[in-house]
Image: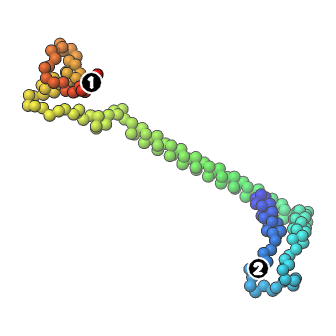
């Protein structure tokens, strides 16, 4: 609170000390013209600084002149401070609860999407096989044994005289 008062004071002081713009008219069209000569500022910056200093010294002595008003003001400031602190604690606890709730929801979604069986429908679909030649799948089995070898536990058969399922690349001349 006192920070805002200090900022307001210094900004007001800076605005008072800024030089006036010569062609600028007063914002109040019906205000009487200043009695000073044309081109001079209506308020001298040094007089304004002196007035601000006297106002500050008067404000410092206010509690000496009106102790009851200062006591009531300090009680109000203390009450407002405790209420602001309680409000900030309430706001922080609410935000903390919201963040915890969001984390819980994300964890639930992650657990719901990860069942024990992680196979997808694509994984469960049968592998592609070449269309059969009408021999009941014996050609596909022969092609598989040529590529992958004989089935486990079965005796090794003589290699088929048919062309291999995977063509070999042509050889480059040496």
Disc 2/disc 1 C-alpha distance (Å): 95 Å
Find residue 48 and report its image quarter: bottom right
Measured as percent of width and height from the top left, residue 167 is found at: 21, 27
Q: Is residue 62 visible?
A: no
Nearer to us: label 2 or label 1:
1
* In the rendered image, the vertical position of residue 109 relative to residue 61, given as above or below: above
Q: Is residue 141 above or below residue 37?
A: above
Left-right relation of 166 to 84: left
Residue 23: mark: 2
Above-or-below relation of 132 to 146: below
Farthest residue, direction front = 174
Give the camera-side residue of 169 and 57.
169
Q: How are the colours assigned in the image?
A: rainbow
In the image, is 153 to the left or to the right of 87?
left
Earlier sequence position, callout 2 versus callout 1: 2
For disc 1, the neighbor class at 10 Å (few under 14, some 14 to 19, many from 20) is few
Residue at 50% from the left image edge and 46% from the top image edge? 102
- Residue at 46% across, 43% down: 106
Can residue 139 be seen? yes
Secondary structure category for the residue under label 1: loop
For the residues bearing labels 2 and 1, Cβ distance under 8 angstroms: no
Percent from the top left, x then y, of residue 171? 25, 24
Question: Which quadrant of the structure image shows residue 132?
Answer: top left
How packed mark 2 is, by other alpha carbons closer than 10 Å (few <14, some 14-19, many 20 or more), is few
Q: Quadrant of the C terminus?
A: top left
Image quadrant in which you'd find residue 115? top left
Q: Which mark is residue 173?
A: 1
* Front residue of this view, candidates 142 and 9: 142
In the rendered structure, the answer to whether residue 65 lies left or right of residue 78 reads: right
Could you tell me which residue is drawn at 21 percent across and 34 percent down? 128
């Amino acid at each position: 609170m006192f920070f805002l008062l200090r900022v307001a004071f210094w900004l007001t002081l800076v605005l008072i000390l800024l030089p006036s713009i010569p062609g600028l008219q007063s914002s109040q069209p019906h205000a009487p013209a200043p009695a000073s000569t044309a081109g001079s500022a209506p308020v001298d910056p040094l007089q304004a600084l002196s007035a601000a200093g006297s106002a500050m010294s008067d404000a410092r002595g206010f509690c000496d002149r009106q102790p009851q008003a200062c006591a009531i003001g300090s009680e109000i400031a203390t009450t407002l401070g405790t209420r602001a602190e309680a409000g900030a604690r309430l706001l922080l606890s609410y935000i903390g609860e919201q963040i915890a709730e969001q984390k819980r929801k994300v964890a639930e979604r992650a657990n719901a999407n990860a069942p024990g069986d992680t196979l997808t429908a694509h994984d469960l679909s049968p592998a592609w096989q070449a269309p059969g030649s009408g021999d009941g799948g014996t050609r596909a089995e022969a092609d598989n044994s040529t590529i992958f070898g004989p089935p486990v536990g079965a005796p090794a058969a003589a290699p088929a005289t048919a062309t291999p399922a995977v063509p070999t690349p042509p050889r480059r001349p040496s």
